Amino acid sequence: MRMNSWLGIILGAAAIVIGLSIGPARYYLNSDGLRIHRPEWSDHVLPGAVAICKDGSQSFSHHVWGTCNYHGGVKHWL
């Protein structure tokens, strides 16, 4: 393989990694290893939301503990 081909592969892979790391991740892995939607703000209740946090965001947590953590705690459960 020529040098230009390797360079293209390396630059392409770097672009993918950089592209994936730009902006906040919309999901996290919970303590069970499940992919959970991060809290999000909306004017209406979003599908799958389980609680409204004190900062107005909606939580999609699967556990009571940690729900709305860093969002002021739970304002009310849905």
Image: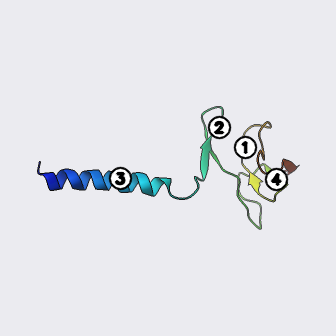
> Disc 1 designates what residue?
61
Distance of label 1 from label 2 (alpha carbons) = 8 Å
Q: Position of residue 32 (x, y in %)?
A: 64, 31
> Disc 4 designates what residue?
53
SS for dot 4: strand
> Disc 3 designates what residue?
14
The mark nearer the N terminus, 1 or 4, is 4
The mark nearer the N terminus, 3 or 1, is 3
Residue located 74% across and 64% down the image: 42
Q: Disc 3 residue type? A: Ala
The mark nearer the N terminus, 1 or 2, is 2
Distance of label 1 from label 4 (alpha carbons) = 11 Å
Q: Are marks 1 and 2 in contact (CB under 8 Å)?
A: yes
In front: mark 1 or mark 4? Answer: 4
Task: Tell me which colouring the rendered structure shows.
Answer: rainbow
In front: mark 3 or mark 2? Answer: 3
Residue located 75% across and 37% down the image: 63
SS for dot 2: loop
> Disc 2 designates what residue?
30
Viewed as shown, does residue 19 lie left or right of 14? Answer: right
Q: Position of residue 64 (x, y in %)?
A: 80, 37
The mark nearer the N terminus, 2 or 4, is 2
SS for dot 1: loop
